[in-house]
Amino acid sequence: MTTDWREAPTEALLETLWTCGLAVPPGLPEEIVRRGVETREPLCAFTADPASWEATEGPAMWTPILVIHLLGAIGDPRSAPVLLSALRERNLGDFLHDGMPGVLAWLGPEVSEPLEAAARDPSLNEYQRAAAVRALYGVGCRAPEVRADIAVRLSRIVEESQDATLLGFAASVVACVDDPVAQRALDAAFAEGRVDESIIGLDDVELIRGETPWMLDRGTSDPMAFFGEESLEDLRALERDRARWRAEAAEREARKARRVALLEAHPALARALPQPVVGSFGTVRRAGAKVGRNDPCPCGSGKKYKKCCLGVL
């Protein structure tokens, strides 16, 4: 039965959000965004709390990622300080590149100045600064009235930066800006060897320049797209893979521990194992006699080797 979240109290919406992980109920994100006046402050408080980011597995691991996308979708520029703090201090993984630019861009032109400051902040790594550049570009895509200002800010970043990796990531969006000053700054960066051309080459930039300027999907995406069923199912599949990898790694460690314990308890079994040794001409030969599957187990249990310790070893 589908819940009509429009009828639920705000506390119930948030309680569900805190615990649902990637099993996001249909309609819940939309209702949380619709009630942004009520939900924004609790979402900001959650994001600012270091304890919210401590989980490394299970549903709680995904909650901060859900929350920052909702804050972006609400689009209130007053959320900028807490979101920029998350950009600086939290391990966002792939979402630093894939989601955070859109989250920040959806806050609107009011965040242009702090975004430029983040993009030029040497205390941030190149990936964090690149996310700020892409967000700044996204602001211009969504607000044509501030494109001239955004072009000036992007030009300053390109002119001043000596970080080849940052400029490699930034070039793909700066090339979409229909401003001659920005394009001259980008050309100069390539001519001076300040762009990592393993990320993007000048030929690629020329192709981008031939496209429609200020294309939104080149740098950012709607934060609510994160809650689409296809997007969530991709993440669930990734989580299933991770769970399988963790289980396989745990089983390997358990087998190793059982083997060590068995060999320590039964030295005769250890001597009977085929342990390679190097001969005089570099050949490999067995150090002890081979134990057949149907031979008595060297551990002394009286069982056949295949029915006793073979599986563990």
Image (cartoon, rainbow, N blue to C red):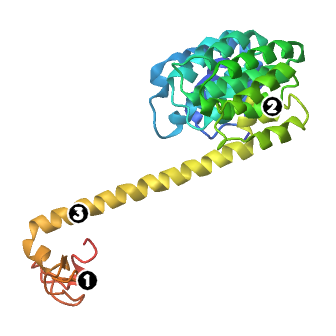
- Of residues 213 and 18, the one nearer the viewer is 213
Which quarter shows the C terminus? Answer: bottom left
Alpha carbons under labels 1 and 3: distance apart:
16 Å
Q: Check disc 1: other Cα within 10 Å, few if <14, some if 14-19, many if 20+.
A: some
- The amino acid on which the numbered mark 1 sits, given as a three-letter code, is Lys
- Of residues 201 and 116, the one nearer the viewer is 201
Q: x and y percent of residue 234 in the render?
A: 66, 48
Q: Residue at x 21, y 75 (%)?
A: 309
The circle drawn on residue 306 is 1
Q: Check disc 2: other Cα within 10 Å, few if <14, some if 14-19, many if 20+.
A: many
- Of residues 105 and 232, the one nearer the viewer is 105
- 1 or 3: tag closer to the N-terminus: 3
Q: The residue tagged with tag 3: helix, strand or loop? A: helix
Q: Quadrant of residue 217?
A: top right
Task: State left or right for residue 224 relative to residue 87.
Answer: right
- The amino acid on which the numbered mark 3 sits, given as a three-letter code, is Arg
**Residue 75 visible to an observer of this rendering:** no
Q: Disc 2 vs disc 3: which is toward the camera?
A: 2
Q: Check disc 3: other Cα within 10 Å, few if <14, some if 14-19, many if 20+.
A: some
- 2 or 3: tag closer to the N-terminus: 2
Q: The residue tagged with tag 2: helix, strand or loop? A: loop
Answer above or below: position of 145 versus 168: above
Which quarter shows the N terminus? Answer: top right
The circle drawn on residue 258 is 3
Q: Which residue is mark 2?
A: 175
